[in-house]
Image (cartoon, grey):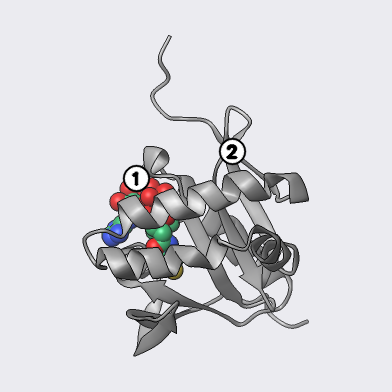
Amino acid sequence: MATAHPRFALRPVVPDDTPLLVEIFRASILELAAEDYSEAQQDAWSAAADDEAAFGARLAGALSLVVTLNGTPVGFGTLTGGETIDLLYMHPGVAGLGAGAMLCDALEKLAGARGAKTLTTDASDNARGFFEKRGFVPQRRNTVLRGGEWLATTTMEKPLAGKASP
Ligand SMILES: CC(C)(COP(=O)(O)OP(=O)(O)OC[C@H]1O[C@@H](n2cnc3c(N)ncnc32)[C@H](O)[C@@H]1OP(=O)(O)O)[C@@H](O)C(=O)NCCC(=O)NCCS
């Protein structure tokens, strides 16, 4: 019987996830960012995962979570340095079904629990509406060089509700 909502779950990233997360990263950029970036820009952006070992090390160096559907990873996100969402990528097959929100929620809670007062992200143009909806406020426009291509992004910040001091 079909279910109304997919059952997503979260767990920490483990090293064996890396090859699948590289595939999700590439598919996410190539399909979900196509309206805002040229093919050359998308290729340059997704080339960040060409060195799989380096990409795995990037994941291992952050607080990294994977979102699964029936046990299979369908997206991932990272909290870097305690107060930055560095990566947040969903497989196009689950886009718009709430997996990104679930993952971002968890990263926001982890950042808050670790004492962050604000959470920052450098949002791609296609993801800006997603972060705005979650209370992130645009701070400045950037042009970043990725693999020989210039890409426009927006630095966004969200104040986190801190616990009152005793
Ligand atoms: C941005 C991204 C992570 C969102 O993940 P998602 O699982 O599709 O998002 P969700 O289904 O959880 O959406 C949550 C809410 O945000 C809204 N939303 C999602 N993407 C949006 C967008 N681009 N613009 C405006 N609203 C958006 C949804 O409609 C939903 O609204 P609702 O709560 O009213 O139903 C995903 O689209 C993605 O991987 N994009 C490509 C990679 C990328 O650019 N990552 C960000 C790098 S900074």
Is residue 101 shown to the viewer in this render? no
**Numbered mark located on residue 46 in the image:** none
Which residue corresponds to the image point at 45% horizontal and 54% vertical from the top-left?
26
- CB at mark 1 closer than 8 A to ligand 1? yes
Q: Nearer the viewer, residue 81 or 146?
A: 146
Q: Residue at x 63, y 47 (%)?
A: 19
Q: Quadrant of the C terminus?
A: bottom right
Q: Please provide percent x and percent y for residue 70.
A: 58, 27
Q: Nearer the viewer, residue 79 or 53?
A: 53
Instruction: Say which residue appears at 59% left-offset and 44% top-offset.
Output: 20
Could you tell whether 76 is left or right of 147 in the image? Answer: right
- The residue that label 2 is drawn on is 68
Q: Is residue 5 above or below residue 11?
A: above
The image quadrant that residue 68 belongs to is top right
Label 2's element? strand
Residue 95, picture quadrant: top left
Q: Is residue 8 visible?
A: yes
Q: Image height check: is 17 above or below 33?
A: above
The answer to whether mark 2 and mark 1 are in CB contact below 8 A is: no
The quadrant of the image that shows the N terminus is: top left
Residue 155, above or below 4: below
> According to the image, label 1 marks what residue?
96
Label 2, label 1: how many angstroms apart (C-alpha)?
15 Å
Residue 126 in percent (x, y) is at 30, 64
Assess disc 2: are there few (<14), some (14-19) or many (≥20) residues with their C-alpha within 10 Å of its C-alpha. some
Amino acid type at image mark 2? Thr
